[in-house]
Amino acid sequence: MYFSRRDGVVSPSLWAQIERTMIDFLAYPGTRQWWETRKHWYTEDFLPASWMKLSQKAVSPKRTQPMI
């Protein structure tokens, strides 16, 4: 998706939606752990431009009380 956006295939409005979804996923500790063990799969071009930027925006989700 990143390269499609970079190359102009994905519109800015669609990219904004994708980016918000990625930010949500990055808020979870499991996703962050997965990233730390697999970021070597991705190119240098991808890393600083997208994932690192998004990971700084991500905020841990708030836990809600279970319904009884």
Image (cartoon, helix red, strand yellow):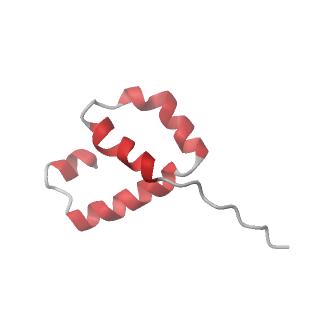
Residue 66 percent location from the top left of the image: 79, 67
Residue reaching furthest front? 56
Residue 42 shown left or right of residue 22 in the figure: left
65 with respect to 21 (left or right): right
Q: How many marks?
A: 0
- The residue at the point 64 percent across, 61 percent down is 62
Question: What residue do we see at 80% from left, 72% from top?
Answer: 67
Give how far across and how far down residue 11 sits, in percent: 19, 63
Quadrant (top left, top right, bottom left, bottom right) of the C terminus: bottom right
Q: In this view, does 3 lie to the left or right of 31?
A: left
Q: In this picture, is 31 found above or below 18? A: above
**8 is higher (above) or lower (below) than 43:** below
In this orientation, which residue lies closer to the viewer: 1 or 63? Answer: 63
The image position of residue 30, as x and y in percent, is 59, 42
Of all residues, the one furthest to the left in this rendering is 8
| 28 is higher (above) or lower (below) than 10 | above
Residue at 31% over, 63% down: 16
User: As drawn, which residue projects farthest toward the right?
Assistant: 68
Which residue is found at the position 44% from the left and 46% from the top? 55
The image position of residue 54, as x and y in percent, is 39, 49
